[in-house]
Image: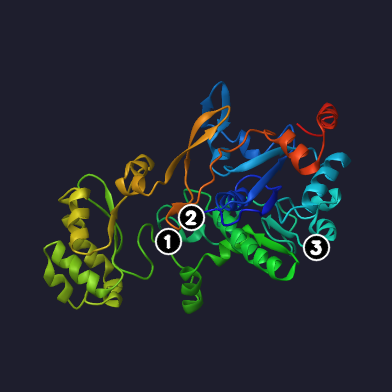
């Protein structure tokens, strides 16, 4: 049984990536997630293309599809008083609200944490913002790229030659979604024990700073800004990329015994006895000299040859794959990381599964990302008790879509 959150209802007022990433993960684990969007605009990412996925004369952005499976879609204009009342009524019967509006915006609509928790004291209300609920930057809009730069992540990404670089995916957004999920689950545990909720404040900048991890402590230890090492490691040697005859490979030597096995595998056992390379500290001090020994060796054979040889020797190594290589990899295929989700109008849609396994089964929602307002009638009838005439009247006035 992989529906650990069955019975939990989440009202998702978030857009773009961090908030939707959190709610998608909880949908994967069985929560009922109602995604509320304005009837005309919808989630910003619905328009973030190309690339687009084209199915049955419907164009959907790839970006939107990555973060919204397993959800029900309600199109409601909560800038209107009637739309606000619909959302408030849904929140009164929900366990969690997730939103990522700028600080103060939802207060104008009576949909802020204080207003909704006065209706439902059990409510776990999670605000995902760029800079948090207070502080000199709290009113600014938040985007991953801004957070990566301000939070120091870009300063340690890239090489000395490249200058600061962002990561290839919106890592600050994704990590914020994961931190938000962890906080929500902890708050639900409290809710189950005490019957009371709380207001969670999770920001892109805070998360980016928190995930500096060892690089932050490298700074604390030395008082110096860590340099950019490209694909090398600031603390461990050799822990970097090498170019084989056909493509790159990554080598991750975590201790001295692994280094000795590496030297055996590449036919240079004497390197492990060289005082310059015998310990990680000495290897770090003589990194360039060690690279002079290893670079021509790895260039002499294919990546597959080296991976096979190093794997047999118990040396951590792996290829540098293109995305197509990832989904063709036999282990990734065995683990079921690519899924096909059925959509009534769009047919079978490819997707990436949740990485979480529960009792041997993949925790992934069974339904594809919904179209804008796809479940509006269902939600209004089932959760709010409205009849078809009432729903039609709301739609005629543009309150729902």
- Reading the image, the residue beneath label 3 is 121
Task: Give the mark nearest the N terminus, 3 or 2.
Answer: 3
Answer above or below: position of 33 versus 297: above
Residue 10 x/y as whole percent: 68, 51
- Can you name the residue that lies furthest to the right here? 81
**Alpha carbon separation for disc pair 3 and 1:** 48 Å
Front label number (3 vs 1): 3
Residue at figure coordinates x 84%, y 32% from the top left: 394
Q: How is the image coloured?
A: rainbow
Residue 68 x/y as whole percent: 59, 43
**Alpha carbon separation for disc pair 3 and 2:** 45 Å
Marks 2 & 1, CB-CB < 8 Å contact: yes
The answer to whether one can see residue 245 in this image is yes
Residue 312, picture quadrant = bottom left
Residue at figure coordinates x 42%, y 52% from the top left: 162
Residue 357 x/y as whole percent: 45, 56
- Reading the image, the residue beneath label 1 is 228
- Residue toward you, 204 or 72: 72
- Reading the image, the residue beneath label 2 is 164
Residue at figure coordinates x 79%, y 58% from the top left: 113
Residue 279, picture quadrant = bottom left
Q: Secondary structure at mark 1?
A: loop
- Residue toward you, 190 or 21: 190
Task: Give the mark nearest the N terminus, 2 or 1.
Answer: 2
- Can you name the residue that lies furthest to the front here? 1
Q: Quadrant of the C terminus?
A: top right
Residue 41 x/y as whole percent: 71, 34
């Amino acid at each position: 049984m992989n529906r650990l959150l069955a019975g939990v209802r989440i009202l998702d007022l978030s857009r773009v990536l961090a908030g939707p990433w959190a709610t998608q993960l909880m949908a994967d684990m069985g929560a009922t997630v109602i995604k509320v969007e304005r009837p005309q605009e919808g989630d910003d990412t619905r328009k973030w293309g190309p690339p687009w996925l084209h199915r049955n004369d419907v164009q959907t952005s790839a970006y939107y599809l990555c973060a919204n499976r397993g959800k029900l879609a309600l199109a409601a204009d909560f800038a209107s008083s009637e739309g606000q009342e619909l959302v408030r009524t849904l929140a009164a019967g929900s366990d969690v609200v997730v939103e990522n509006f700028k600080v103060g915006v939802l207060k104008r609509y009576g949909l802020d944490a204080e207003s909704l928790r006065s209706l439902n004291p059990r409510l776990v209300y999670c605000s995902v913002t760029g800079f948090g609920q207070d502080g000199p930057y709290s009113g600014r809009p938040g985007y991953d790229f801004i957070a990566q730069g301000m939070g120091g992540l870009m300063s340690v990404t890239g090489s000395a030659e490249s200058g600061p670089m962002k990561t290839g995916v919106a890592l600050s957004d994704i990590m914020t979604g994961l931190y938000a999920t962890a906080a929500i689950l902890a708050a639900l545990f409290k809710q189950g024990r005490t019957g009371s909720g709380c207001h969670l404040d999770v920001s892109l900048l805070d998360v980016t700073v928190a995930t500096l991890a060892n690089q932050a402590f490298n700074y604390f230890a030395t008082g110096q800004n860590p340099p950019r090492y490209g694909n090398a490691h600031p603390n461990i040697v050799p822990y970097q990329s090498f170019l084989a005859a056909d493509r790159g490979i990554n080598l991750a030597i975590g201790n001295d015994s692994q280094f000795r096995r590496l030297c055996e595998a590449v036919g240079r056992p004497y390197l492990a006895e060289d005082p310059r390379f015998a310990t990680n500290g000495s290897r770090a001090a003589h990194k360039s000299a060690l690279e002079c020994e290893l670079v021509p060796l790895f260039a002499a054979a294919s990546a597959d040859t080296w991976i096979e040889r190093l794997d047999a020797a118990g040396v951590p190594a792996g290829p540098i794959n293109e995305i197509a290589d990832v989904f063709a990899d036999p282990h990734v295929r065995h683990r079921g990381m690519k899924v096909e989700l059925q959509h009534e109008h769009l047919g079978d849609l490819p997707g990436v599964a949740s990485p979480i396994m529960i009792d041997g089964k993949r925790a992934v929602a069974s339904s594809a990302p919904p179209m804008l307002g796809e479940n509006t009638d269902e939600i209004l009838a089932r959760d709010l008790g409205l009849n078809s005439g009432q729903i039609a009247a709301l739609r005629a006035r543009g309150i729902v879509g």
